[in-house]
Image (spheres, coloured by chain):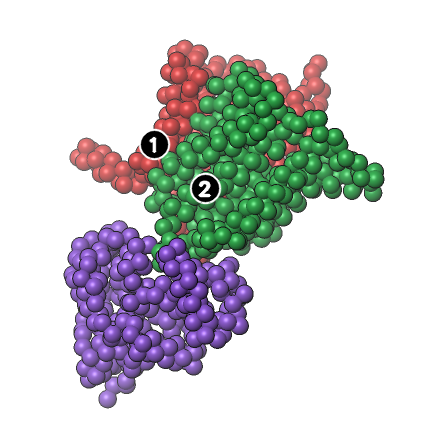
Chain colours: A purple, B red, C green
Amino acid sequence: MLEVQDVVTSYGMIQALKGVSLAARTGEVTCILGPNGAGKTTLLYTIAGILRPRSGSVRFEGRELAGVPADQVVRRGISLVPENRLVFAHMTVRENLLAGAYARLGRDGGGVKVDLEAMLERFPILRQRAGQAAGTLSGGEQQMLAVARALMARPRLLMMDEPSLGLAPMIVEQIFEIVAALNREGITVLLVEQNARLALSIAHHAYLLEQGRIAFRGTPSEVSANEAISRAYLGIKRG
Amino acid sequence: MSDYFVSLLIRIGIEAFVALSAYLLLLMGRMSFGQQGFFVIGAYAAGLATALYGMPLLPGVALGALVAALGGALFAGPMAAPRGLAFAAGSLAFGELVRVALLDLYFQGQVGPDLIGPAGPDGFRGIRALFTSGVSVTTYAVGIWLALGVTLLATAFFLRSRWGEALRMIGEDEEAAATVGLPVRRVKVSALAGAGGLAGLGGGLFAHYATYVEPGHADVMLGVHSLAYAFIGGLGTPLGPIIGVALDIGFLESFRFLAGYRMIIFGGLVMGLLIVRPRGLLDEVAVHRLSRFLMRGRR
Amino acid sequence: MVDFLQALVDGVMLGATYSLLGLGFTLIFGVLRRLNLAFGPTILVGIYAGSHLSLAWPGALVPVVAVTVAGALLAGVYVERFSFRALARQAPVVSMISTFAVWMQLQELVSLLSPSRTMPYPSPVWLPAVAVGPILLRSDGLLMWSGATLIMLALFALLYRTRFGTTIRAVADSSEAATLMGVNVAMVGAAAFLVASAVGGLAGVLIAQSHQQVTPYFGLWATVKGMTAMLLGGAGSLPGAVVGGLALGVVETQTLWHFGGQWRDLVSYALLFLVVALSPRTRWGSGL
Ligand SMILES: Nc1ncnc2c1ncn2[C@@H]1O[C@H](COP(=O)(O)OP(=O)(O)O)[C@@H](O)[C@H]1O
Ligand SMILES: [Mg+2]
């Protein structure tokens, strides 16, 4: 579904991605692990069109995506749940959800209404808070809202940047259950996480990104089998 | 030298002090719309010292600068913390407060046959120390430029010192500067005082050249111009602001046929320049290249 | 007591136009995170255009209003194009300096094109003043207040009740997230700029009809009033700008009544300074 080939992305003189290649297969959860500063957010932003790659290609459903502006990428069927959620704090929960459907509002007003109802059904907490400013929500609620908002665009590929950041373990598990459920419903997921154990539990494929390069790729069990990686990322104590 | 040329030199020199003071604060990440306030504080104080209390010219001007620097230090009390738009707004309010307050300042004394001193909206007339001291205008112009040269050298020296390092670091990231243990508050207060002093020095020099100052000289336009000068010339070197002033007053003023359109042309130049060189003519990269080139020349 | 009430009423009527100026500033600052110093001067262009038309065609009120707003819009497009869009990738402060350059251009332009510094502006002087008990409501003040209130209602309806308005607020809230939703942030910014310029033009009409004349200093005056209204309201909040403008108007007229004209500006600047000094941690445009 998504193929990233030799992508190089820089901030000024600093190369954050030094030739990254990966693929996300239709219907799967693909997970990207890696330490802080590895370039995970940069990779997602490059795919989303907010950053332009210096070189390399990003193909989605067979069409080139590199160089397509961000507001058009959404219309191609890719949504990103950004790091730190970035909900519209001064707008109500309902307005946030409608904003998520921005790309469809003109063409598919009826569909948006149906989806809005479906989101409030799936996330009952959002229905309770529908008229409230999003900034007043708790961290977990904001994360739910960010996911629901992204879904309002009806993406075929959902990208998530560290959804567990700063949330209590119980909430994190809830979020991951939702991601797994969405995936079973047919949405392809590209998941960036530092919580490797949980991410691997729902992933079909995993990549390890270190200092702007893919350092390892494999199935979750291959990752767990690799001693160096599990020591560094799964917190397994030395022998 | 023609009188006209000398007067141009003096105007450039005086404005350069105010532009330099705005530049110093820009390095610290603060845009000030209020340096004109310190300019007139220096002008009034220097005028009072010489005209009312009979001080000689040089100590009088120096005292004016000192009073303005003190004003800057006091200003730092509430204004060291705010930054961004808050600082811009606070400095604007301060500049206007000074102007409006001067409209109501009456403080006159009998000097010989005349009443001398600030007289509200009529301003402060009869600051004649330059002319009674027998210094020619040309000498005065040379003196201003000497003072400017010394100030520039001193500024360059300070900017290279650890103080300058700290100043720039505060401009980049104040939290980080505090975390690595820099005396952030002390640096900010001293920079605000120094900037006040520089503008006040310009004010004292101006008052004695014009023989009067009035509240209108604290027009916001002076502050905003100074800020723009610092930007046009470039943020890479203290010479930048002076180049900005020279470009506006010197270059454009000398094309007299442009007289009616000067603002339109100058405004257009600045606008275009910012699109091509957003950090001014002499930005950091240009300064770096230039100094490498000069070093090579020396060998 | 009657003095106090009279000054209060006058202040609210005057302050309503300050609120409009503050709203224009807030729209631009909120969406683009950049300060438009040339906001007052763009309105100045509109007022001068309207004044020229009224000289050539006396009695034509509606066309004068239309030309005033059109002039402000045209100048706004110029500012947006060269000081904002062309500098979108630069630090916000670069835009601000650029708007100052445009300011000088616009101010000189209107001076050059006008026969005298002070230009007349038409006012519907035939409207009667209204007396409510001991309080006198002057017609120009009533016009300022009712006009400004109508414009504000329309603007708030636009911003809070339409999809376009929601998009503007979304960009103001987080332009990054808005981009991720598929919003073309640059286009929304330009649109918000035009809305602000139109609001500014209308505010210009209301203020100029009250002054019945205009000088090139109007640009500076309007920029300072609008910025103060925005900052008093907390910079970035639309309802805040309304409150800030009203507060500024009331403080000005109360000081005028009780202490005299020379204190009016002193008190309003002292107010602004105090707001900054007492809330230094406000992250107003902390990006600089
Ligand atoms: N806006 C930026 N400007 C400059 N460098 C950046 C910027 N954002 C990220 N970087 C750098 O790029 C690298 C990758 O960052 P990022 O993609 O955020 O990593 P991750 O999401 O894996 O923690 C880091 O070294 C970071 O310092
Ligand atoms: Mg990240």
Name the residue at 37% across, 56% down.
Answer: A107
| Circle on res. B272 | 1
Residue B291 is situated, as x and y percent measured from the top left of the image, at 25, 37
The chain containing the residue under callout 1 comes to B
Give the camera-side residue of B36 and C47. C47
Q: CA distance from mark 2 to mark 1?
A: 21 Å
Give the camera-side residue of B37 and B64. B37
Location of residue A178 with respect to B293 vertically, above or below: below
The chain containing the residue under callout 2 comes to C
SS of the residue under disc 2: helix
Residue C146 is situated, as x and y percent measured from the top left of the image, at 66, 40
| Callouts 2 and 1 in the same chain | no
Give the camera-side residue of B244 and A38. A38
Q: Is residue B118 visible?
A: no
Q: Residue furthest bottom?
A: A239
The image quadrant where one finds the N terminus of chain B is top left
The image quadrant where one finds the C terminus of chain B is top left
- Examine the image and state in which quarter residue A163 appears: bottom left
Name the residue at 58% across, 24% down.
Answer: C60
SS of the residue under disc 1: helix
Residue topped by disc 2: C193
**What's under tag 2, amino acid-wise?**
Phe
- Examine the image and state in which quarter residue A149 appears: bottom left
**What's under tag 1, amino acid-wise?**
Gly
Mark 2 vs mark 1: give the one in front: 2
Residue A3 is situated, as x and y percent measured from the top left of the image, at 19, 65
Name the residue at 22% across, 72% down.
Answer: A26
